[in-house]
Image (cartoon, rainbow, N blue to C red):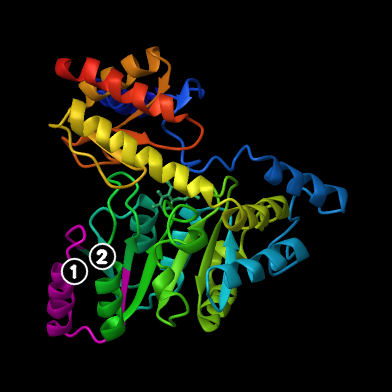
Amino acid sequence: MDRLAPFRQQLDALAQDDRLRRLNLRQGIDFSSNDYIGLASHPALADAVRDALRSGTPVGATGSRLLRGHDDVQAAFEAKAARFFGAEAALGFGGGYVANFAVLTTLPQRGDLLLMDDLSHASTHEGARAGRATQQMFRHNDVGHAEDQIRAWRQSGGTGAVWIAVESLYSMDGDFAPLADLAGLADREGFLLIDEAHATGVYGPDGRGLSHALEGRENVLTLHTLGKALGGSGALICAARPLIDFLINRCRPFIFATAPSPLMAAAGSAALDLLRSEPSRRDRLAGYVRDFRAELARRLPQVATSNSQIMPLIVGQNGPTMDLAARLQDRGFDVRGIRPPTVPQGSSRLRVSLNLNATAADVVRLAETLEEFWPDM
Ligand SMILES: Cc1ncc(COP(=O)(O)O)c(C=O)c1O
């Protein structure tokens, strides 16, 4: 019996469809990481970790938060983050994926409706699938369609709360959610969960994110990841105190898991300080976005761009997308192709991530090189 045959067959099928993934070590100029403002290698983060170690902070949390894993560094970081993000309370998780999963499997109750944007991240889908609420999707950024879905659900007897889950800046399309309209809908119907994964540290006053105008509302929850612009790893859920207390009491991924390393809390705390003390990083990144947009508009006007640091350049088919990425990589640009199921069939793309690990001159050179290669597409 060949036990491994089913796995080989599926891998072969992926290869046939140009969708076989491999792990590639990082090399070349960074146009693919989420280290948007270059904090991952900032000396202040390394110093914060060293200082924490020197003052006796253990490397590992040693247990669940509800047992011995509750650490003063983590507690101080959560209190600081809650103040920073204008929330009543904040709770740390090992990453954004688990934080989305944790919230969506814990807070929406049986009888509630969980409504997700079509382009929501995989972790939102997984949380919805494993959770208790009825789940539905609405067309990307279409608040009218979200309202229609809620109306239809109410007409069919739905009486619970509605939980609307969106990203403030979409990870693969680089476009922004209509947060004010969504918050209005949530005020009438229930709650709004805003995944700020790609906006935290980049947008809003002091990099507080795109949800800054909604801070402190009892029906708005925000997810801020520490592994993207903040340069470390982990995530925070910021919300009203009773919701955080409910997570502490009922959230299985929180209760039955070793707490995140307190060293990441030390790094996260230093990152929040840098957001305040080095605002020029956000300005420089905004300059890259302007420059890249202008270069592409001039050189490749047929290629649509976004208004954010995430620039999806849609190629369409998987093979040509990966070929183009490989050619750019040969020229020293670390640009990655993104294929289904991460993005819908037929919309494979280069996801150009502008970040401060590249120079302004690199940004222009990338646009030049794209102009050279694109006609072959
Ligand atoms: C929108 C969004 N939410 C959540 C996550 C997961 O966050 P983390 O990488 O911290 O697990 C990602 C990561 O790619 C993301 O893009």
CB under 8 Å between callouts 2 and 1?
yes
Q: Nearer the viewer, residue 243 or 336?
A: 336
Residue 32 image position (x, y, % from top left): 42, 33
Would you place residue 31 above or below residue 208 in this image? Answer: above
Report the span colored magenta.
138-164
Q: Dot 2 corresponds to which residue?
A: 178
**Type of residue at label 2?**
Pro
Left/right of residue 12 with respect to residue 301 in the rendered view? right
Q: Position of residue 165 (x, y in %)?
A: 33, 66
Q: Earlier in the sequence, mark 2 or mark 1?
A: 1
Q: Quadrant of residue 312?
A: top left
Q: Which quadrant would the N terminus be assigned to in this image?
A: top left
User: For the C terminus, which image quadrant?
Assistant: top left
Under circle 1, the secondary element is helix
Q: Which mark is residue 143?
A: 1
What residue sits 23% from the left and 31% below the top? 296
Eyeballing the image, is 234 above or below 90? Answer: above
Residue at 36% x, 58% y is 124
For badge 1, the amino acid type reads Val
Q: Residues within 10 Å of mark 2 (few under 14, many from 20)?
A: some
- Please state the horizontal and vertical placement of residue 204, each as a whole percent of the image: 44, 61
Residue lying at the far right of the rendered structure: 55
Is 209 included in the stretch rendered in magenta? no
Instruction: Name the front one of labels 2 and 1.
Output: 2
- Neighbour class for label 1 at 10 Å: few (<14), some, many (≥20)? some
Give the Cα separation between the discs numbered 2 and 1: 8 Å
Can residue 68 be seen by looking at this rendering? no
Res 15 → quadrant: top left
Which residue is located at x 26 percent, y 22 percent?
A: 370
| Residue 161 shown in magenta | yes
Q: For residue 62, which numbered disc appears in the image? A: none
Is residue 25 in view from this perspective? yes
